[in-house]
């Protein structure tokens, strides 16, 4: 797209690589501010020019480079691919929005990065939310709590996956809270015995919200609260999800750009878990299925063509199910052969994956 450039801020994971590929496939000029080690070799993508890649050690180094990139002759969008980058840009919205096209157009997400605040707004918009309350670490945990519960950080940036616990009693809560952690604030939710998870993949534009479909997560690794390793992208109608309340939620927030909404499906109901205000790690599957939502965003056109049911796989972790003996090789091979979107390997952009595995092999010798 002429006279448009996207500045990506993120780390070396599928979130960033998928974002680069979706933009590159519609010929958008991309600048990458890569924070941390390039473990997935995302900087080797064919869609990046070497002088458009900046390797940084921390987010604070981004601002001088972003200011240096300012060019009044072109539209420059800032898109983030992880929560910390999204929170960093949100904190600098006032200044950046004067010269760049930012996610909140000068306003702020602020407390909406907090899961409890999200849940309350979701409920107001007509979305089904599990019963929940907030617990501050150090306070006495209520003896009268409902069980079983899911205990997790209210803000993903202030906790880790290891801070997520399923507890069936007061003693189990105390045992979970006794573990070493930097998390100080939790959301306590009624535990839903899920049949599967859903990640809706959407985008907010100046002309509305577009959510053509989502991913039904079929396998995770290593645990049920780990990243999805295998799933299927299908339409929202096939998933049985009414997007109108979600559209109300996003319009209320005023966010522009790629996002995802996580649900738990159980007994015919879809329970809201959280919104990720950034490009999702599974979002490239939407592009592979015929809905390039980054193109939708840059063109401010909320309609997409016909989407295809598309299986996705994260090959780097999904094969671990075979190694562990939880999935047979023949079942895995059948799933591999029908996969239409590999999150890591892409025939049109093979260098990141080839570089990644070359580095792994060479490190052993």
Image: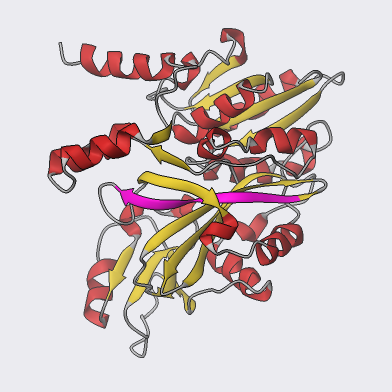
Whether residue 58 is visible, yes or no, is no
Magenta-drawn stretch contains 212 = yes
- Give percent across and percent down for residue 97: 79, 38
- Give percent across and percent down for residue 354: 35, 15
Magenta extent: 209-220
Among the 4 quarters of the image, the one containing residue 13: top left
By secondary structure, the bulk of the magenta-drawn segment is best described as strand
**Above or below: residue 244 compared with residue 40:** below
Using residue 24 as the reference point, say whether residue 41 is left or right of it.
left
- Image quadrant occupied by the N terminus: top right
- Give percent across and percent down for residue 18: 52, 31
- Image quadrant occupied by the C terminus: top left
**Above or below: residue 305 compared with residue 252:** above
- Relative depth, front residue between 172 and 231: 231
- Give percent across and percent down for residue 223: 26, 53
Magenta-drawn stretch contains 194 = no
**Above or below: residue 10 compared with residue 32:** below
Query: Farthest residue in the bottom direction?
Result: 144
**Above or below: residue 78 compared with residue 282:** above
Query: Farthest residue in the right direction?
Result: 73
Residue at figure coordinates x 12%, y 45% from the top left? 325
- Relative depth, front residue between 267 and 78: 267
Residue at figure coordinates x 37%, y 74% from the top left? 191
Whether residue 62 is visible, yes or no, is yes
Residue at figure coordinates x 66%, y 26% from the top left? 7
Using residue 247 as the reference point, say whether residue 223 is left or right of it.
left
Among the 4 quarters of the image, the one containing residue 163: bottom left
What's the image's color scheme?
secondary structure
How many circles with numbers are drawn on the protein?
Answer: 0
- Relative depth, front residue between 239 and 160: 239
């Amino acid at each position: 797209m002429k006279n448009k450039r996207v500045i990506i801020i993120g780390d070396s994971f599928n979130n960033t690589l998928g974002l680069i590929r979706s933009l590159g496939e519609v010929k958008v000029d991309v600048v990458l501010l890569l924070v941390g080690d390039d473990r997935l070799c995302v900087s080797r993508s064919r869609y990046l020019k070497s002088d458009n890649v900046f390797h940084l050690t921390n987010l604070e180094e981004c601002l001088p480079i972003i200011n240096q990139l300012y060019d009044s002759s072109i539209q420059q969008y800032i898109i983030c691919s992880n929560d910390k980058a999204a929170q960093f840009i949100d904190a600098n919205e006032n200044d950046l929005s004067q010269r760049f096209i930012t996610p909140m157009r000068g306003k702020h997400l602020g407390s909406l990065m907090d899961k409890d605040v999200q849940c309350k707004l979701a409920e107001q918009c007509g979305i089904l939310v599990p019963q929940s309350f907030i617990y501050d670490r150090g306070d006495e945990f209520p003896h009268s709590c409902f069980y079983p519960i899911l205990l997790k950080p209210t803000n993903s940036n202030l906790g880790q996956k290891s801070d997520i616990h399923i507890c069936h009693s007061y003693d189990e809560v105390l045992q979970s809270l006794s573990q070493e952690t930097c998390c100080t604030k939790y959301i306590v939710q009624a535990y839903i015995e899920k049949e599967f998870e859903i990640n809706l993949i959407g985008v907010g534009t100046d002309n509305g919200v577009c959510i053509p479909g989502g991913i039904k997560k079929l396998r995770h690794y290593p645990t049920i609260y780990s990243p999805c390793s295998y799933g299927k992208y299908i339409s929202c109608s096939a998933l049985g999800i009414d997007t109108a309340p979600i559209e109300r939620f996003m319009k209320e927030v005023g966010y522009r750009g790629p996002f995802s909404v996580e649900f738990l499906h159980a007994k015919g109901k879809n329970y809201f878990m959280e919104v990720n205000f950034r490009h999702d790690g599974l979002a490239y599957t939407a592009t592979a299925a015929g809905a390039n939502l980054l193109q939708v965003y840059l063109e401010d056109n909320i309609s997409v063509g016909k989407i295809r049911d598309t299986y996705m796989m994260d090959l780097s972790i999904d094969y671990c199910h075979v190694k562990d003996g939880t999935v047979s090789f023949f079942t895995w091979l059948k799933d591999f052969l029908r996969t239409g979107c590999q999150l890591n390997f892409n025939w049109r952009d093979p260098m990141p994956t080839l570089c990644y595995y070359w580095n792994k092999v060479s490190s052993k010798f």
